[in-house]
Image (cartoon, grey):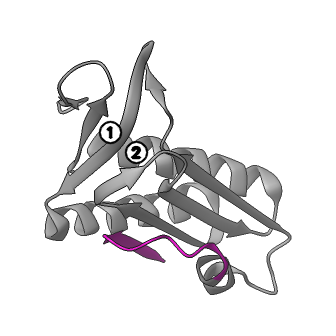
Amino acid sequence: MQFQITNQEIKLESLRRAILRDVSGAFVSFEGLVRNNNDGRPVNGLEYSSYIPLAEKEGMRILSEAKERYSIEAAACVHRIGSLKIGEIAVWVGVSAAHRDAAFNANRYIIDQTKARVPIWKREAYLDSPAEWVNCT
């Protein structure tokens, strides 16, 4: 189980290898990408900030909850901070489990809870107006 905040590019293959298990019949991953628009406004890029010690502690709590709820073998979540360009991976979640239902459900739980509970803030850079912090509740 690994939850990490990083300012480095997310390396998919090494993350996948780290959570695959011989007893797992399923592996599910999610990649959250930087898109070029939000609510009809053209976006040029994003900047993420975080309070890393609290973010990683809460993230590990979420992974533990997912393991208890869905009987998964392993899980990881990595979220970028810093400036990101259109098309870059902002967040990655991977889950391995004996069966697909557990893997799909746990993956959805991890990304939803990460967005709701982990202290990560997003600033969108717009093409047609000044940058704004969004979803910072």
Return the mark for residue 102.
none
Counting from the top left corner in percent of width and height, residue 9 is at 45, 71
Which residue is tagged 2? 113
Identify the amino acid type marked 2: Gln
Question: Dot 2: what SS?
Answer: helix
Q: Is residue 101 above or below residue 1?
A: above
Q: Quadrant of residue 21?
A: bottom right
Identified at 71% across, 55% down, the residue is: 102
Q: Are marks 1 and 2 in contact (CB under 8 Å)?
A: yes
Question: Front-most of 96 and 134?
Answer: 134
Would residue 6 be found to the left or right of residue 24 on screen? left
Question: Front-most of 3 and 42?
Answer: 42
Q: Quadrant of residue 117?
A: top left
Counting from the top left corner in percent of width and height, residue 86 is at 48, 45
Would residue 2 be found to the left or right of residue 16 on screen? left
Identified at 61% across, 85% down, the residue is: 18
Identify the amino acid type marked 1: Ala
Counting from the top left corner in percent of width and height, residue 75 is at 56, 70
Point out the image quarter for the C terminus. top left
Mark 2 residue crowding within 10 angstroms, few (<14) / some (14–19) / many (20+): some
Counting from the top left corner in percent of width and height, residue 47 is at 26, 48
Would residue 119 be found to the left or right of residue 46 on screen? left
Question: In the displayed image of the protein, which residue is found farthest to the front?
Answer: 128
Return the mark for residue 116.
1
Q: Is residue 89 magenta?
A: no
Disc 1/disc 2 C-alpha distance (Å)? 5 Å
Identified at 22% across, 19% down, the residue is: 129
Stretch of the chain drawn in magenta = 1-13
Marker count (numbered)? 2
Would residue 117 be found to the left or right of residue 113 on screen? left
